[in-house]
Image (tube, grey):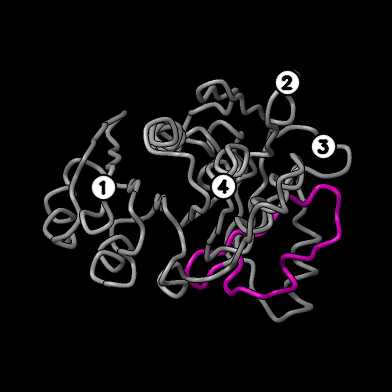
Amino acid sequence: MLRGRHQRYDKLYLYSLNRKHPALHEISDEDFIGCWEEDDLAILFFHRPKRELVEEVARKFGLTLEDQAEVTYDEWGEGRKVGTLQVGPLTLRPLWQEGDGLRFDPGVVFGSGNHPTTRLCLSWIYRLWEEFGPFERAADLGCGAGLLSLLLTALGAEVLAVDFNPLCVALTEKNLRLNGLHHKATVVQEDVRKVLPLQAELVVANLFKGILLDLFGLPSFWTARHYLISGFSPSMEEELKAALWPKVELKGREEKDGWVIWHLENKMLKP
């Protein structure tokens, strides 16, 4: 996350450690961006080179520095630049861009606004809001940087935002607080499969295929009327369709840059 004198991202310095440790999220250094956890690994991000600091932290907690890299922020985002997002009448701007609207720190996590699935979810949230809303309660499963939660709370919903990665949870909380919307959301660090059943009218799940398949097989997942499902490619659609609960109906589909979003409706809850 951006802190101190840092107002935008440029170069990223990454240090991969062999194990996770809670203290890695609490490094007191103005150049520290955050700690990403992937399986059993921990990756530290900094704005400037910090090998000596990382080695000191590793020794202190019995960890091993396994790799390091230097990339630009655009390279980390697969060449997709983070910029202003327009969703209906609402504007979402990264912190370094001036102007009115909702402000966000995109961080170094998924869901920063530069990926097609995030843009698809933002667009379809507003589309459903106009057609079926307003929704009093919504769930954002795999909240990432929190942009979907930010839009949902700005539209008026009470939101449950869930992510397993602590860096995503911290960034979502920051972005909600930046806009004075933190009181409209509950942000939870947890496996999304463990927060069911959901008390929501709209569920947005932008997740990996394996997690979607697990959720599709749980009756406790199908308690909302509307679902926006994304995070998969066209080649994965048949397998996902075969796993759908029989009582949900595919009402809408859109593809963007090789990624897909579905709008599903629970036939049992239709008026």
Amino acid, disc 3: His
Q: Tell me how far mark 3 sits from mark 1, CA to CA.
A: 41 Å
Q: Tell me how far mark 4 sits from mark 2, CA to CA.
A: 21 Å
Where residue 182 sits: x, y (%)? 72, 51
Amino acid, disc 1: Leu
Task: Please name the residue that numbered disc 1 is placed on.
Answer: 264
Specify the segment rendered in magenta. 16-41
Local SS, label 4: loop
Sooner in the amino-acid sequence: mark 1 or mark 4: 4
Rendered position, 156 above or below 44: above
Q: Nearer the viewer, residue 4 or 86?
A: 86
Q: Nearer the viewer, residue 22 or 84?
A: 84
In the rendering, which numbered label is found on residue 157?
4
Q: Which marked residue is nearer to the observer: mark 3 or mark 4?
A: 4
Where residue 32 sits: x, y (%)? 77, 52
Where residue 119 sits: x, y (%)? 44, 32
Task: Please name the residue that numbered disc 3 is placed on.
Answer: 6
Where residue 46 sits: x, y (%)? 73, 48
Q: Tell me how far mark 1 sits from mark 4, CA to CA.
A: 19 Å
Local SS, label 1: strand
Q: Quadrant of residue 154?
A: top right
Sooner in the amino-acid sequence: mark 1 or mark 2: 2
In the rendering, which numbered label is found on residue 100?
2
Q: Which marked residue is nearer to the observer: mark 1 or mark 4?
A: 4
Q: Which marked residue is nearer to the observer: mark 2 or mark 3?
A: 2
Sooner in the amino-acid sequence: mark 2 or mark 3: 3
Q: Tell me how far mark 1 sits from mark 2, CA to CA.
A: 33 Å
